[in-house]
Image (spheres, coloured by chain):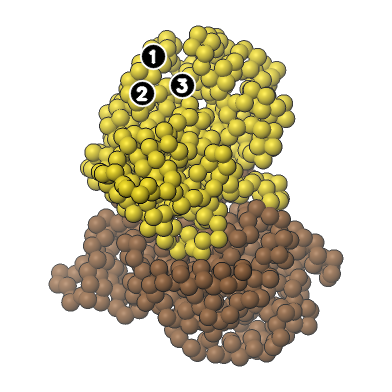
Chain colours: A yellow, B brown
Amino acid sequence: MIRFYNGKVLRFAPAMRVTEDEVWTDGGRICHVGPAPESLPAFERQIDLNGDLLIPGFKNAHTHTAMTFLRSCADDMPLSDWLYKQVFPHEAKLTPEMLYDFTSLGILEYLSSGVTASFDMYFHNDAYAAANIDCGFRTVICSALNNFDRDVENIEREYLKFNALHELVSYRLGIHAEYTTSMERMQYMVSLAHKYREPCFAHLCETKAEVDGCVERYGMTPPQLLDSIGFFDYGGGGFHCVWMSEDDVALFARKKLWAVTNPCSNLKLASGIAPLDELRAAGVPMAIGTDGAASNNALDFFREMYLASVLQKVRRFDAAAGGADAALEMACVGGARAMGLEDCDDIAPGKRADLVVVDLRRPNMQPLHNVPRNLVYAGSKENVRLTMVNGRVLYENGEFFVGVDPAALYARVNAHVREMFG
Amino acid sequence: MIRFYNGKVLRFAPAMRVTEDEVWTDGGRICHVGPAPESLPAFERQIDLNGDLLIPGFKNAHTHTAMTFLRSCADDMPLSDWLYKQVFPHEAKLTPEMLYDFTSLGILEYLSSGVTASFDMYFHNDAYAAANIDCGFRTVICSALNNFDRDVENIEREYLKFNALHELVSYRLGIHAEYTTSMERMQYMVSLAHKYREPCFAHLCETKAEVDGCVERYGMTPPQLLDSIGFFDYGGGGFHCVWMSEDDVALFARKKLWAVTNPCSNLKLASGIAPLDELRAAGVPMAIGTDGAASNNALDFFREMYLASVLQKVRRFDAAAGGADAALEMACVGGARAMGLEDCDDIAPGKRADLVVVDLRRPNMQPLHNVPRNLVYAGSKENVRLTMVNGRVLYENGEFFVGVDPAALYARVNAHVREMFG
């Protein structure tokens, strides 16, 4: 058992609050939250929080982890050049070995940012899952069916395989996007969703061009189209959700579909600012993701949370729009539930021990008027003192404990990149 | 002498580039940039960069450092409530002792963010200057003449006093803003600018309401009005510059006035997104500031630089807008020149030793496709390994060397805040 004591705890259910509880973990789960009893059991380790804050880790609810290899190689250019001249040609050269290393690099970055789980959509899922398991990181793989897949039925095999592989890995259904997937293939995905009674996800309403193209092709917006073929019959949601019509928002609210926002990516690729306040007002459940490093370029959850609030203010010209508490709830709780990780969504007995210690003794966290707002509006990666996934400390005081030597990994990553870029 | 070796160096003049030079400092200045000679002199300290990047420090070209005391106590509320219910009433309770501590807290935050100088506009300038001198930090005070000043002539006394006080402190002329300053007082400021042949600064075009009010009062925008009375006869510029008309941009370009952008503050207070691309295209010199922690809420230069680029992309719906290199130049070079610190604007022999070591061996800085873009688009405070001001290391590996014990300072700051907020 591990004991966290002498600090603050951010708890969510039934309402967000900061308490002075102790938190104990046993194996991969939280076993006690509350005051210390009179006599303490034996602990494997006792962590003195020293006034710092324990929070449920951030959940990165949409990403392409291995895209770290494209960081800073395709910036400040039009979207079409980015996609067709940089992203696609280099992705074609990816090997499973490269992908394993690029994924490991992304996992180190997550840990240093307080992220304890990812909802990932990319290629080479065997190598991807292996990197996560080897690092001890939690991930949910989302299938990305599209017209370039040679073996459509691989999705079902992957669904069965990855959901039985390891407690750190699970798999959910999804298509890449309407504009990259034929109606026949979308209908195949619906048949899988129906067969397994599973929620279904897709890149959705990311750009105006995507929505306009779908309306031209089908006479419906992407959400309306997918709903019309039964895609959302067992729930699910969309990544990005920037260009949502009122009807789209109403659909998401009625079916309780997850809107996963990616504010940094939407800025960098000039996609727009998602209408989060309207989605929230309608009752749509929401989560936050970094998207891949190719379009961000960081995997920095502090930046995403901050922008998930403040961009609403400027979009609506109302300083009261957005809101720190809502952004924090999306980051810690919403993300977990969007990914099907209901037991990672809070600090409470029985929940998974996916925890982060936030250093409040840095100048940016002082004074202590309001700890959650400090975290959202002034927090940065310098405040991540410790990250624990499934009861194991994987990051502490700037060091990684994932069985990977960062210097050796960086050397391999740079060698791969030189090989790919020639 | 101190020697930085075995790493990379970001240099600006005559063009931005990353070199493999060594950098030596002697007292407060850089004395050598280039390869190591065959025989080395004796050094007080040799700092192995280990592949990391040495940059000229970031210059925070508009801030109210002591406003750290209002961090997270006035968020997510309309602008008028923020100003009249939170900022003004609490500012009235500030004592010089409090201001000294709140300023020291801000300086620690700057150092942890790679900021080596600030352009500050606030109250109690004696206490403010003392905190900077005691910490070894560089600052330029800007006067903030407005209708609430009881002793107008204090500006001239301060101008003479602070420009003669200490090598780390200087003083420039400015009014708070047109909307808080009578024509008579603005004209008094012009008389000082003429008398001392000094540039003049002001909060300018921050909100649409400010511009509309000025047009109503005077039939001119704030830049046009100030220019019409001779305010800019010796240069100067504006803070924020969000709502600039084409004529305002042309005026700034013609007179080479500094547009200082504050992207985080402009988002948080819902002021808008400054037209940086248009200003740059017109040839307006630019710099970046954090504004105060009351409206930000961090003093995090990585966040400001990042947004100085990416907000342009979404504002123009063009992924090629903005640009990392321009943002970095504004942060390191532009800020120095806007503040009159021409000898702090680059890494070159004779320049001030205001330097920052950026840790490239963190996952967010890998792979090394493009180091400047990594810095702007993926950098964070976790990457600040060392901050040196005027040849003295004030921050290294998370520790501060400014003669202030952070824990004791935080205790005093929180005690002041309890006293003020009751």
**Mark 2 residue crowding within 10 angstroms, few (<14) / some (14–19) / many (20+):** some
Circle 3: element type: strand
Circle 1: element type: helix
Point 75% across, 82% down: residue: B185
Estimate the x, y position of residue A393 in percent, counting from the top left.
31, 43
Determine whether A203 is above or below B405 in the image: above
Estimate the x, y position of residue B211 in percent, counting from the top left.
76, 63
Circle 2: element type: helix
Q: Which mark is residue A125?
A: 2
**Mark 1 residue crowding within 10 angstroms, few (<14) / some (14–19) / many (20+):** few
- Residue B404 shows in this picture: yes
Q: Amino acid at mark 3?
A: Arg
- Residue B376 shows in this picture: no
Q: Are marks 3 and 1 on the same chain?
A: yes
User: What whole-number distance in Å separates the C-alpha atoms at marks 3 and 2?
Assistant: 13 Å
Camera-nearest residue between A183 and A403: A403
Q: Are marks 2 and 1 on the same chain?
A: yes
The chain containing the residue under callout 1 comes to A
* Residue under numbered circle 1: A160
* Residue under numbered circle 3: A172
Camera-nearest residue between A150 and B22: A150
Point 47% across, 79% down: residue: B131
Point 39% across, 14% down: residue: A160
